[in-house]
Image (cartoon, grey):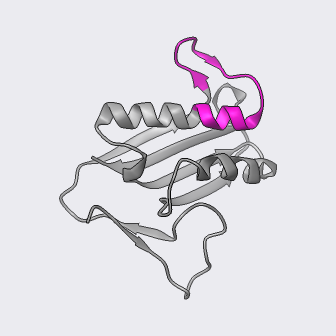
């Protein structure tokens, strides 16, 4: 078993594509992925266009870093999503959910005053190798 999802009726249910908790067995290498924003690696520029396209770019960037570390999205146990406004919560959830299967990682989502390069979304992750 690589990791185990925790779910209990004694705490509030997840209100999005995430798990209440994830248990990772001891003895694993862990990778902490810095926050990724919708910058296109080939140009170094922020991706213009709809928020959904920007979230896809963030997830591509996150996937690339995980791959370089020897991991992947299936091994992500925790993410943090930073939004410029909670008005974007539903749109981000819709795209984000497509990247994780039936056992999504634990997650926190917060609205912040500002993000690098004035982007609307940033996502960081913790995964195992």
What is the residue that sits farthest to the right in this orientation?
87
Tell me residue 125's x, y (percent): 46, 47
Where 68 sits versus 18, above or below? above
- Between residue 40 and residue 122, name the one nearer to us: 40
The residue located at (60%, 31%) in the rendering is: 57
Question: Along the line of sight, which residue is nearer the eye, 8 or 83?
Answer: 8
Residue sitting at 35 percent across and 34 percent down? 67
- Of the 4 image quadrants, the one containing the N terminus is bottom left
Hey, which residue is sitting farthest left in the picture? 27
User: How many numbered marks, from 0 up?
Assistant: 0
- Residue drawn at x 74%, y 42% as measured from the top left: 84
Report x, y in % for residue 55. 64, 38
| Residue, far top | 43
Q: Quadrant of residue 31?
A: top left
The magenta stretch is 39-57
Q: Is residue 23 left or right of residue 28?
A: right
Rendered residue at 40%/51% (across/down):
74
Q: Is residue 31 left or right of residue 108?
A: left
Judge whether residue 129 is colored magenta.
Answer: no
Q: Can you say whether 45 is above or below 96 in the image?
A: above
Q: Quarter of the image holding residue 2? A: bottom left
Across and down, in percent, residue 66 comes to 38, 38
Q: Is residue 49 left or right of residue 26?
A: right
Residue 92 image point, x, y percent: 69, 47
Q: Is residue 84 above or below residue 3?
A: above
Residue 46 lies in the magenta stretch: yes
Picture quadrant of residue 43: top right
């Amino acid at each position: 078993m690589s990791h185990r999802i925790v779910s209990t009726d004694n705490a509030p249910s997840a209100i999005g594509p995430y798990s209440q908790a994830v248990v990772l067995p001891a003895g694993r290498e862990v990778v902490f992925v810095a926050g990724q924003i919708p910058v296109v690696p080939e140009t170094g520029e922020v991706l213009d266009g709809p928020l959904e396209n920007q979230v896809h770019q963030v997830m591509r960037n996150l996937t690339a870093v995980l791959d370089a570390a020897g991991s992947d999205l299936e091994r992500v146990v925790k993410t943090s999503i930073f939004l410029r406004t909670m008005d974007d919560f539903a749109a981000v959830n819709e795209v984000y959910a497509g990247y994780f299967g039936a056992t999504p990682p634990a997650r926190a989502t917060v609205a912040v005053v500002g993000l690098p390069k004035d982007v609307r979304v940033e996502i960081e992750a913790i995964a195992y190798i």
